[in-house]
Image (cartoon, grey):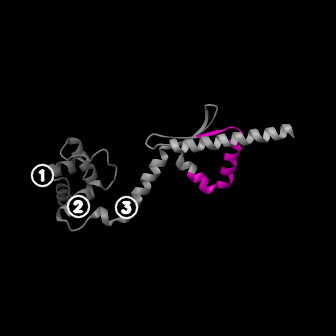
């Protein structure tokens, strides 16, 4: 691409004057991306927001605003795949912030995210289920901890399961002892 087209393209993209675009491109070896970064560092162009990490923020943000102003087309509502993908990502993020603690007498052996537990249960259930039963026999306790989710009901159920397993173990000991 010749220099005039690069200057014009940068000028339109960054909404700057012809001279500013020319200086930015010349000082960055006619690389348009480097020139944009140079303009951001100098304060000529506003940097993208830090909280958004999409690579296409600059490209689509103006188009979406334009469409919303024209009221012809609602980008968010029409793109069902994007909504499903965002819901799945949110679910995975939530599961990554919920932890299963495996402990015995207040000593924590393992603390893993629920996402890992779900994946292990799905792909290795023939190993996980017997390990849980063996753990209950040896008085291993399971607790769920989360910052954003109330895990009291789950922990109550897990405590009941631990209590029942201890009761069954005691009954078996009595039967063997009296036996």
Answer whether labels 1 and 3 touch (C-beta < 8 Å).
no
- Would you call the spot at circle 3 few (<14 residues within 10 Å), some (14-19), or many (20 or more)? few
In the rendered structure, the answer to whether residue 164 lies left or right of residue 174 reads left
* N-term mark: 2 or 3: 2
Tell me, yes or no, whether the two marked residues, 2 and 3, touch with CB atoms within 8 Å.
no
Specify the farthest residue to the bottom. Answer: 72
Label 2 and label 3: CA atoms lie apart by 17 Å
**In-image side of 165 versus 178 (left or right):** left
The tag earlier along the polypeptide, 1 or 3, is 1
Q: Earlier in the sequence, mark 2 or mark 1?
A: 1
**Is 46 positioned to the left or the right of 139 in the image?**
left
Question: In which quadrant will I find the N terminus?
Answer: bottom left
- Out of 43 and 93, give the one closest to the viewer: 93
| 2 or 3: mark nearer the eye | 3
What secondary structure predominates along the stretch shown in magenta?
helix
Please state the extent of the stretch shown in magenta in the rendering: 118-142
> On the image, numbered disc 2 is attached to which residue?
63
Which dot, 2 or 1, sits closer to the camera?
Answer: 2
**SS category of the residue bearing label 2:** helix
Q: Residue at x 69, y 46 (%)?
A: 133
Q: Quadrant of residue 63?
A: bottom left
C-alpha distance separating marks 1 and 3: 37 Å
Magenta segment: does it hold 27? no
Whole-percent x and y of residue 128? 66, 50
Element marked by disc 3? helix
Viewport quadrant of the C terminus:
top right
Residue depicted at 17% across the width and 55% down the height: 11
- Residue at 28% of width from left, 52% of height from top? 33
6 and 48: which is toward the camera: 48
Residue ID for mark 3: 82
Which one is nearer the viewer's eye here, 21 or 170? 170
Residue that numbered label 1 is attached to: 17
């Amino acid at each position: 691409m010749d220099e005039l087209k690069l200057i014009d393209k940068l000028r339109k993209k960054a909404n700057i004057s012809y001279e500013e675009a020319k200086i930015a491109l010349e000082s960055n070896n006619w690389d348009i991306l480097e020139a944009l970064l140079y303009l951001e560092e100098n304060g000529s162009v506003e940097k993208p927001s830090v909280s958004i990490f999409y690579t296409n923020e600059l490209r689509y943000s103006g188009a979406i605003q334009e469409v919303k102003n024209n009221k012809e087309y609602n980008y968010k509502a029409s793109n069902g795949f994007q909504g499903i993908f965002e819901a799945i990502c949110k679910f995975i993020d939530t599961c990554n912030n919920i932890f299963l603690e495996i402990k015995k007498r207040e000593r924590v052996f393992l603390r893993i995210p629920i996402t890992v537990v779900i994946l292990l249960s799905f792909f290795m259930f023939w190993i996980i289920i017997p390990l849980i039963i063996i753990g209950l026999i040896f008085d291993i306790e399971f607790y769920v901890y989360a910052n954003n989710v109330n895990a009291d009901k789950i922990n109550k159920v897990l405590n009941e399961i631990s209590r029942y397993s201890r009761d069954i173990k005691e009954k078996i000991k009595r039967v063997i002892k009296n036996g």
